[in-house]
Amino acid sequence: MYFGAGVAVRLFDQLTPSGVAWLRLLGAAVLLLAWRRPGRAAWRGRRLALAGVFGLTTALMNVVFYEAIARMPLGTAVAVEFAGPMAVAAFGTRTRRDLAALALVVLGVGLIVDVQWSGSATGVLLAITAAALWAAYILLGKRVATGGNGLDDLAVGFAVATVLLSPLAVTTGPAWSSPSLLGLGVGVGVLASVIPYALDQVVLRRVGQARFALLLALLPATATLMGVVLLWQIPSPGEALGIGAVVAGVALRSREKAERPPEEV
């Protein structure tokens, strides 16, 4: 996911953020459809409607976030966007232990990300919108996952979103005359969408949405650890403390009975 995000940011010099997001969506849709080959039932009725709304919400979340990080520091945008899943986790808080876990996770994310309160008002508004869409992604993703055909519906949803957001394709002009640029744009879809969102569906079938939202705090912690292993980027004392707080918060979260995942067709 984070390797894909790094590639996407580099593409902003040659393509618009929205154009990169649409190429990401296109690449993910093509690969998912080729892999899953959803049957006719996936393209009908309420199942199609739910998949379409889920796919469009996910795609808009990525478009808005890319537009946000083009206008404000990445760390700040990440911190603001994390308000979405943290809100979901907060609404699922039932005990003081859960509340303490949430507080640790919020503190940890704040210490890990490089928050610099700068950037345009538009960037802040876009980041807030991305937060709301991320919360909606979790809620809708849970419904899709528990339907028993999460990966098929993910493929259908991305296909629907690709068509509905096709006007964004007009900003991808340079990519169609550059195989390497097009390949990178589509590759971002594999790294940043297909793999992580498919894994999200697997996890969402087994845990509650509040617990899943809290688990998302492991993303910035994992990114920091990857920086140590791959790039020898040693975290500051504050970042190290943040990683510890996130891990402690996730471990502290009250245990839930594992949900029995439905058979996937």
Image (cartoon, rainbow, N blue to C red):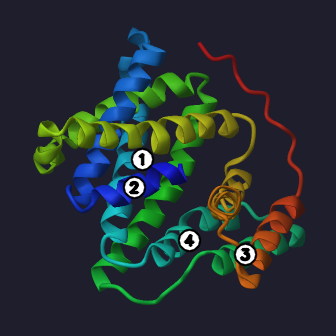
Report which residue position mark 1 lands on: 58
Report which residue position mark 2 lands on: 61
| Residue at the image position 56 percent from the left and 80 percent from the top | 114
CA gap, disc 3 and disc 2: 23 Å
Report which residue position mark 4 lands on: 83
- Residue in front for this viewpoint, 101 or 233: 233
Q: Earlier in the sequence, mark 2 or mark 4?
A: 2
Q: Are marks 4 and 1 in contact (CB under 8 Å)?
A: no
- Residue in front for this viewpoint, 106 or 221: 221
How packed is label 4: few (under 14 Cα within 10 Å), some, or many (20 or more)?
A: some
Q: Mark 1: which amino acid? A: Thr
Q: Position of residue 213 (x, y in %)?
A: 66, 56
Report which residue position mark 3 lands on: 108
Figure quadrant of residue 13: bottom left
How packed is label 3: few (under 14 Cα within 10 Å), some, or many (20 or more)?
A: many
Q: Secondary structure at mark 4?
A: helix
